Amino acid sequence: MFAERIDRLTSSLVRDILAAASRPGVISFAGGLPASEVLFRASPQVLGQLPDDIWQYGQTEGEPALREQVAIRARALGIACKAEQVLIVNGSQQGIDLVSKLMVEEGTRVLTESPTYLAALQVFRLMGAHFVTAAQDEEGLLPQAVAGADARLAYLVPTFQNPTGLCYSQARRKALAGAFDTQSMVVFEDDPYRDLSFDGPAPAPIVSHLKQARWIYQGSFSKTLAPGLRLGYLIVHPDLIQAMTRLKQAADLHSNRLSQAIVTQLLQDGSLDQHVANILPLYREKRDVMQAALLQHLGDKASWALPSGGLFFWLTLKNEQDVMQLMQEALTAGLAIMPGSAFDPVPHPSSTIRLNFSHSSFEQIQQGIALLGSLIK
Amino acid sequence: MFAERIDRLTSSLVRDILAAASRPGVISFAGGLPASEVLFRASPQVLGQLPDDIWQYGQTEGEPALREQVAIRARALGIACKAEQVLIVNGSQQGIDLVSKLMVEEGTRVLTESPTYLAALQVFRLMGAHFVTAAQDEEGLLPQAVAGADARLAYLVPTFQNPTGLCYSQARRKALAGAFDTQSMVVFEDDPYRDLSFDGPAPAPIVSHLKQARWIYQGSFSKTLAPGLRLGYLIVHPDLIQAMTRLKQAADLHSNRLSQAIVTQLLQDGSLDQHVANILPLYREKRDVMQAALLQHLGDKASWALPSGGLFFWLTLKNEQDVMQLMQEALTAGLAIMPGSAFDPVPHPSSTIRLNFSHSSFEQIQQGIALLGSLIK
């Protein structure tokens, strides 16, 4: 009855976990939700200043003033770009959908980290991707592996990666850019966590070091301001912008103008950076509380790296264990966790878990980790 | 470099016309914009009542209260449905994109009216559709032609169609539903113009008469309230809702929550119907002004039917004429029109033009039609 691609729509495991996680009384480390208590909320003043023309159809590319602000910020990160290369999207997930439509068809080889963001895997798979992974170490993908890879598109989250929390070093970024420059693949750098950095600014994006390769850079306002705004952006190599804009037009004509007007105001008056500076201490403290609880309850049962930004811990269990069964047991006991296998581009056996530290309270973090410690062998 | 589907992204003709139409001083009958002077604008009171939780991630399906309101209104139109069948989307265009992903792959046969909404053609074509047209008369598609058609999906705009303005009679709707019930294709009824009806309520949707066929019904708040809200909805046969929801999740997680909260308020307190009642007289008057100008300046040069709702006149020129050249000449003279050929699922020679009457002022309508009359042979 349906198009064949529907057979590739991955199972509802993740939806099921997140639905279960939203039940009252469940402590959830499963999702990737920002801390609700410090989400941006538009003030009556901001809402009172919405331009009068935002109720009519807008430009597919996005509000010109917002595109300009995004380009200014990107150039400050070292990305040489103009406002004309910016495409405002309805959240990062739409950016991935558009890139997938642009680049991926049945059998297209897509190079990814392993593990990587599960909803990107979902969209690429929907369009027919065949995933290619390359060797990586604790600093990320290896340049020599990338130089020898065969793919049309590379998808990377080099800064506080979801799910691992990994942040590529500056040196690795430069070396990888050099490797991509010897390749014909388009580099898609997804960068929603950059501003949630606990130890000073993260290294410049990989795409800022590219000299030859075509690229797409993505940012989001969901983690810094509020996911409910549903607003992110693509910055696109000049060779790709026309097709990307047409795809956006075909997808939904343009993004929500209320949200665009709100975020434009915040960028123009400096409120975004102030807001991020205000919320970072809480994120850092939540991370530290989870780190202390992990050391106490799982110090001898798992290994992990302390994330220097983003929203997640990534645990590898020392004793082999059926993590799906562990997840069920935890849910029964009132705790939601995300099995690491959900993030595998190519399934392989591993006893890994992703834990979100931003959404729960300090008390929930301590209770949840203690409970997890009691369930792990 | 790109996926093959990008080769099927139709040319930028329409974008070019609309871009040219937005130049200062150009009278535009080319787009489909609602009248800016009567667009809904959220009051400080409505904006002041936004729920506090809308800044966090929301449900893929949409806000529960909004889905409930949509289902109540759909049942009042005769569509037997529950709130669980409602999927809130980022405007109608996204609904078409999701249906296209669900149903259309390389070579999928899609039955459409001819002419039909060009952006639907664009999306179906992107995913690989092969268009099938069926015989139609002045009341729409013929039931016997539908009964003999071979397609997986049927796309129809039976109520004040874009581009023709046609509204199917009640009898034709019932007969067509009977024909679809003998078929296996999914019926996708796109219904954004229903509330813009100048002579009392439009006949019930075709899907309300279906007994066997699977169906998708789409509505929009862009024409009744404001396009900038980017909000529409799909109501989906139970066999399709799970896959549609997963596709929505993969496309952008969920729709904008500010817009959803605003529209929920308006539906709950009856403001939407009141707003539509308030704006209809202006739409009717603009239609009548264009009708009078057409009779005066094109009475002997074109034929058309008076639209009883929606946003458009559809003209067929009496003398064969190169409408693309006419469009260029009109643009040079400061008038934007849309060549009818843009709406052809299967290209065929015709001298047709679509004219929007909602966006221009009375004076612009009169000036523009007089100019058009002087340019047509």
Image (cartoon, coloured by chain):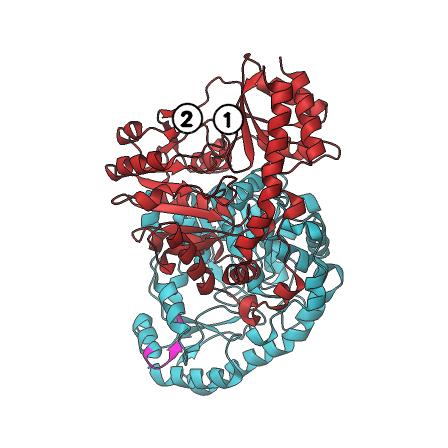
Chain colours: A cyan, B red
Badge 2 crowding class, 10 Å Cα cut-off, few under 14, some 14 to 19, many 20 or more, is few
Is B58 situated above or below A88? below
From where the camera sits, is residue A88 visible?
Answer: yes
Residue A45 % position (x, y): 72, 66
Asked if disc 1 and disc 2 are in contact, CB closer than 8 Å, the reply is yes
Magenta stretch: includes residue A334: yes
- Who is closer to the viewer here, A58 or B5? A58
Circle 1: element type: loop
In the picture, the disc for residue B305 is 1
Q: In the rendered image, which residue does mark 2 sit on?
A: B138
Circle 2: element type: loop
Image quadrant containing the C terminus of chain B: top right
Residue type at mark 2 is: Glu
Is A371 situated above or below A169? below
Q: Specify which label sits upstream in the sequence, 1 or 2.
A: 2
Magenta stretch: includes residue A75: no
Q: What residue appears at the point 65 percent right and 62 percent down from the top-left corner? A: A203
Q: What residue appears at the point 59 percent right and 20 percent down from the top-left corner? A: B324
Is B49 situated above or below B184? below
Whole-number angstrom distance, CA of label 1 to CA of label 2: 10 Å
Which span is picked out in magenta? A332-338
